[in-house]
Amino acid sequence: MLQLIKRCPEYVSGYRDYCKEIYDDPVALLYFRPTNPKSIDDDWFLRTKDWYDKKENGLIEGQPVSFHYWAIDKGKFIGEFQLRTEFTEKVLNDIGSIGYAVRVSEWGKGYGMEILRLGLEIAKEKGMEKVLLNINENNVASIRLCEKSGGVFYDKIKTEENEILKRYWIKLQ
Ligand SMILES: CC(C)(COP(=O)(O)OP(=O)(O)OC[C@H]1O[C@@H](n2cnc3c(N)ncnc32)[C@H](O)[C@@H]1OP(=O)(O)O)[C@@H](O)C(=O)NCCC(=O)NCCS
């Protein structure tokens, strides 16, 4: 059964493998950029822990409060889920409330749907009434997943980097 867990030392090597699969796939990397796998060495978890803790507490200047989860199924690292609970200008007009990805070798098995379903539960638990998904207009897989999960198209915007994003709201009951 797929679970979303907080980052932990036990799954760092799985996280590195997942990042590598995304970095090796030019299309995936176009839509989602995790940590560069080359920087994930034995000290990486401890080196970055303080930064992730500060992000959860809104202590990184210019960054919204955000939470990072890892998706694990039967001990295997499957993907990740990121949740930003504040609607800052950057969230609204660029990164959205949610980020997710599945390792390339596990695409098309329903994991994306499950990660988003579990992630929306977390958003609800954190008191959010709605979340915003900003998706590259060419990212058919993510658009499909979002629409299947209740995403309602709002509009299209162009980012400062000239990327065209479709914005979807998902209401959480
Ligand atoms: C988007 C992503 C998370 C989907 O993960 P996944 O595990 O393959 O998705 P699922 O298997 O749960 O499929 C969900 C739906 O999308 C559809 N889908 C998946 N890949 C698709 C593709 N390439 N083209 C069209 N539809 C696709 C599936 O068929 C399914 O719909 P269905 O049940 O009606 O058939 C995955 O492709 C990914 O990690 N992409 C790179 C990172 C990314 O784009 N993140 C989102 C940034 S906004």
Image: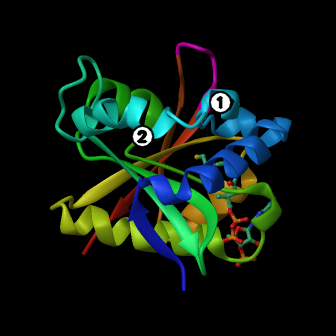
Residue 47, image x, y percentages? 41, 29
Looking at the picture, tell me which residue is in the foreground, 164 or 38.
38
With respect to residue 104, does 78 lie above or below? below
Residue at the outermost front position: 42
Tell me residue 53's x, y (percent).
25, 39
Residue drawn at x 63%, y 29% as measured from the top left: 164
- Pointer 2: residues within 10 angstroms few (<14), some, or many (20+)? many
Q: Does the magenta portion include 112?
A: no
Figure quadrant of the C terminus: bottom left
Q: Report x, y in % for residue 27.
A: 81, 40
Residue at 50% over, 33% down: 43
Q: Which one is in front, 103 or 119?
A: 103
Q: Is residue 90 above or below residue 161?
A: below
Seen from the viewer's position, the closer of residues 125 and 24 is 24
Ligand 1, seen in the image, is in the quarter at bottom right
Residue at 68% x, 35% y is: 37
Q: Amino acid at mark 1?
A: Asn
Residue shown at 73%/36% (left/top)? Answer: 29
Looking at the rendering, the stretch of residues picked out in magenta corresponds to 160-164
Task: Tell me the chief SS of the magenta region.
Answer: loop
